[in-house]
Image (spheres, rainbow, N blue to C red):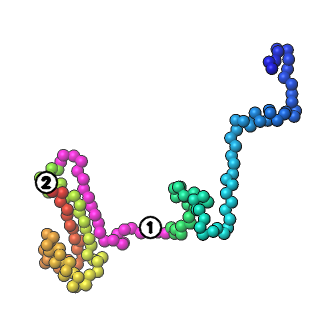
Amino acid sequence: MALRDDEFRSLDLSPNKSLNMRCYYGRKVYKRAAVHVPTLRPFDQDWPSVRPVARSFHPANVLLPLHHGWIIPIENHLPITITTSDYLNSFPSLSDARARIVITLQVKLSFLKLDNHAKDKFFFFLYWLYVLYETLQKYSEFSVVYLVNAC
């Protein structure tokens, strides 16, 4: 019904039900999930219907006994130092010996705490890895360097 220019719209203090339904038509209605989770569950229950399974980790789902303490450097635990080198430019070339060294592995022997028999075995092993046996016996604080060549 169209209004004329000289008419005013009537004020409805108690609008009818059809007007109310039009107001709520555009709004989204959120419903709660009607899943009742009892305290005692049967053993043969379908768990995916109760709890969501396809979900990433959420800290509220699983309680983890984590303790934050001091961060201890890795040198206190593992006496190995690994150094890698990469060359992004054309110098040094492969004819240079430094360019062929890719990985340097250093082990401090004082941290290993070997007995005499184990030291002899270790020195015999290192003798075949480019290090002289007599040089190793002279130094107690010695770090073994093992080089890996790219070529």
Label 1: how many residues lie within 10 Å, few (<14), some (14-19) or many (20+)? few
Q: What's the residue at 56%, 64% (across, down)?
A: 62
- Residue 136 in sight from this viewpoint: no
Quadrant (top left, top right, bottom left, bottom right) of the N terminus: top right
**Can you identify the residue that label 1 sits on?**
71
Query: Foreground residue, 14 or 68?
Result: 14
Label 2: how many residues lie within 10 Å, few (<14), some (14-19) or many (20+)? few
Q: Which portion, as a residue range, is magenta?
A: 69-91
Majority secondary structure of magenta residues = loop
| Identity of the residue furthest to the bottom in this view | 116
- Residue 41 in sight from this viewpoint: yes
**SS label for mark 1:** loop
> Quick check: 52 left or right of 79?
right
| Identity of the residue furthest to the front in this view | 44
Within the magenta stretch, is there residue 40?
no
Quadrant (top left, top right, bottom left, bottom right) of the C terminus: bottom left
